[in-house]
Image (cartoon, rainbow, N blue to C red):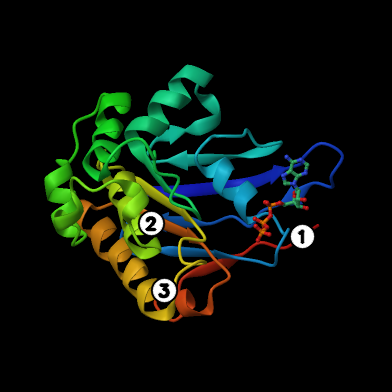
Amino acid sequence: MALQTQSLSFSHPGQPTIHFPDFRVDSQNPLLILGKSGSGKTTLLHLLCGLIRPKSGKVTLGTTVLSELSESQLDRFRGEKIGIVFQKPHLIAALNVRQNLELVPYFSKKKGKSAEELLSDLNLLGKKESSVLTLSEGEAQRVSIARALANSPELILADEPTSSLDDDHAEKVIRLLIDQSAKIGAILIIVTHDQRVKNQISNFIEVKAP
Ligand SMILES: Nc1ncnc2c1ncn2[C@@H]1O[C@H](COP(=O)(O)OP(=O)(O)OP(=O)(O)O)[C@@H](O)[C@H]1O
């Protein structure tokens, strides 16, 4: 399984066109997306998961060209094949840890790992029935990783997952992302400007502002 981009470009309304370098990434070698603030890293991540459509070029995951899918096909594709870890965990406050994870197969209609198995992998089993409001930042970020893994995706996209974590937690979170994506054979792509992440993953592309 591989993800490949070709001649991708995008322009936000009233902004100059951002041109992205071509790259190919497979499940053996995680990729970092680097670049200065405002260069277009989050825009690229949104193109990779089909949340926005490119001005030119294409994104291919496996044999599927994202831009050839309709909106509803894209929504389903994203739910089944892509797990996203955001900068902030964005957990649902009214639900406990287990319920936050159980929402994923409910919405994607795809059976992945059980909440129990995921929490055990991420060393969070003891927090299964806890309110997400009582979690530390590192724990909440691990729950958000568990949530991204819950539908056994083929592609995991993480946007600055370590920016609010201390050195120890940042290293553990990246290690977890690397280990867990390897375990399920998923492609891992991380947007970051965190030097600590560069120490753990050497493969990168750089996005440059127009
Ligand atoms: N919805 C939008 N409308 C107009 N311009 C936008 C929009 N979203 C982003 N931009 C602009 O597009 C450029 C790229 O933004 P993007 O968020 O992709 O950068 P980034 O590299 O992720 O930045 P950061 O590291 O600060 O998060 C920036 O100049 C930004 O101001």
Q: Give the CA separation, mark 3 to mark 2.
A: 11 Å
Q: Is mark 2 within 8 Å of ligand 1?
A: no
Q: Is residue 70 visible?
A: no
User: Tag 3's secondary structure?
Assistant: loop
Q: Is residue 103 visible?
A: yes
Q: Quadrant of the C terminus?
A: bottom right
Q: Are marks 1 and 2 in contact (CB under 8 Å)?
A: no
Picture coordinates of residue 126, whole percent (x, y): 14, 57
Total residue callouts: 3
Q: Is mark 3 within 8 Å of ligand 1?
A: no
Of the numbered discs 3 and 2, the one sitting upstream in the chain is 2
- Which of the 4 image quadrants contains residue 183? bottom left
Query: What number is the disc on residue 201?
Result: 3
Nearest the eye: 61 or 142? 142
Which residue is labeled 1 in the image?
209
Of the numbered discs 1 and 2, the one sitting upstream in the chain is 2
Q: Residue at x 21, y 41 (%)?
A: 98
Q: Residue at x 49, y 40 (%)?
A: 49
**Horizontal placement of 65 versus 208: left or right?**
left
- Which of the 4 image quadrants contains residue 100? top left
Amino acid, disc 2: Leu
Picture coordinates of residue 9, whole percent (x, y): 70, 45
Which residue is labeled 2 in the image?
188
Amino acid, disc 1: Ala
